[in-house]
Image: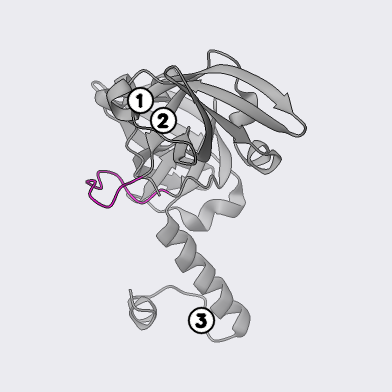
Amino acid sequence: MFTGIVKDIGSIAGIRKEGTNLRMTVRYKNVLEFDDLAIDESVAINGACQTVVALGDNTFDVDTIEETLKKTTLGSFVPGTAVNLERALRPSDRLGGHFVQGHVDCVGKVQGVYELGGSREVQISFPEAFQPFIVRVGSIAIDGVSLTVANVDENGFTVAIIPYTFENTTIENLKEGSRVNLEFDILGKYIARQQELLNNSGKSSGKISEDWLTGLGY
């Protein structure tokens, strides 16, 4: 479990193919954050949860399996690619973002990056099948960065980015055409799934209401 608060911008130090998988070596800069990293720990790399399988001098290795390569942008990495890094959440940590599982739902595409006089707005499109999982002013993880949805339309959504986030994550590198890993808020996914099951059973009118949510314990 993660929070979407990136702790370091690392880089891909090496990649080698192992069957249908990739063994990636990731270099980190924030030694204070990663100095006690251990084998078998989870690290989010651009929002995708990966398991540490080896350690080196300011580096760690992960094995990225075929399923992850299909669902994320990790298969497009090359040596030198900058990546957002976050270690797994500890019970004592402050929850500065939102609950992020590191389970990427889909890959989105940046449609535009716009200056807003002190901040920037990023517009992203994504597969229509995921529309039920996103709401205006809800949370979303983009390449592992916890952000608030500013607006949603039939073609995608927009987020407003403060300067600090641009300076301390790889969001700064996004441009029109960039591909990004998206993870939608887990709460929204559960509600959408329960609504789907109720619709299929014929026990729901198909509308999410306050009474309906209360009956489910929300």
Q: Is residue 19 at all visible to an observer of this figure?
A: yes
Q: Where is mark 3, residue-wise? A: 205
Which quadrant does the C terminus fall into?
A: bottom left
* Mark 1 crowd level (few <14, some 14–19, many ≥20, 10 Å Cα): many
Measured as percent of width and height from the top left, residue 28 is found at 41, 21
Measured as percent of width and height from the top left, residue 179 is found at 56, 29
Label disc, if present, on residue 8 of the rendered structure: 1
Q: Which residues are magenta?
A: 89-100
Residue 99 among those drawn in magenta: yes
Question: Element under label 3?
Answer: loop
Distance of label 2 from label 1 (alpha carbons)? 5 Å
* Amino acid type, label 3: Ser
Measured as percent of width and height from the top left, residue 197 is found at 57, 76
Seen in the picture, residue 155 relative to 25 is either above or below; the reply is below
Distance of label 2 from label 3 (alpha carbons)? 43 Å
Residue 197 among those drawn in magenta: no
